[in-house]
Amino acid sequence: MTTVIYPGTFDPITNGHLDIIERSAVIFPNVLVAVAESPSKKPLFSLEERVELARQSVSHLENVEVFGFSDLLANVIKAHNVTAIIRGVRTTTDFEYELQLAALNRLLTNGVESLFFPPTEKWAFVSSTIVREIYLHSGDVAALVPTIVFNALQTRCPK
């Protein structure tokens, strides 16, 4: 069975992330959403909270599993017999960075390929960073994130 992994910090998971997960779930029989601890990014939500928000956001997809990790992605890939890495790329800057990571991951995993998904036009401008900034400056992000995430933002950072 083909297993792909979609790694990220997901702080928070956005509708753009969800779109890539849903599109991947149509193509591949087994999709792993791997939520990275990423303490250097100083996430708004804890790893456990981000995993739970992602889990609830993809609960309608039977072939998607969500888990957290703090290890090197290459080790996670080996442990889960992953066939390919899914990455979203919005801009040429994203692509250049992801191209470097793809080469490193291919080397560290003995050949696991990265597949780049462009966003659908509706979500091309959405990132977790932008969502956090808009929300923390009292902007409305309800249309940019799953409802469960919007509710968690309101609880974490009430206006």
Image (cartoon, rainbow, N blue to C red):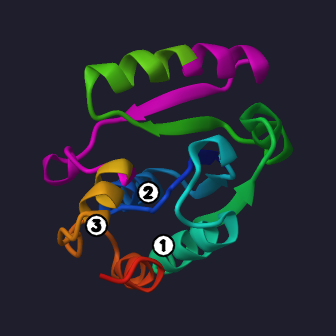
**How many tags in the picture?**
3
Specify whether residue 124 is painted magenta: yes
- The residue located at (44%, 86%) in the rendering is 155
Three-letter residue code for mark 3: Tyr
Q: Is residue 96 above or below residue 112?
A: above
Magenta region: 101-128
The residues bearing labels 3 and 2 have C-alpha atoms spaced at a distance of 23 Å
Could you tell me residue 135's position as x and y percent?
A: 28, 67
Looking at the figure, which quarter contains the C terminus?
A: bottom left
Which residue is label 1 attached to?
A: 58
Q: Nearer the viewer, mark 3 or mark 2?
A: 3
Q: Earlier in the sequence, mark 1 or mark 3?
A: 1
Specify whether residue 9 is painted magenta: no
Other-residue count near label 3 (Cα within 10 Å), few / some / many at <14 / 14–19 / ≥20: some
Which residue is label 3 attached to?
A: 135
Could you tell me residue 78's position as x and y percent?
A: 82, 37
Could you tell me residue 120's position as x and y percent?
A: 20, 48
Three-letter residue code for mark 1: Val
Q: Secondary structure at mark 3?
A: helix
Q: Is residue 85 left or right of residue 131?
A: right
Q: Is residue 86 above or below residue 17?
A: above
Quarter-of-image position of residue 137: bottom left
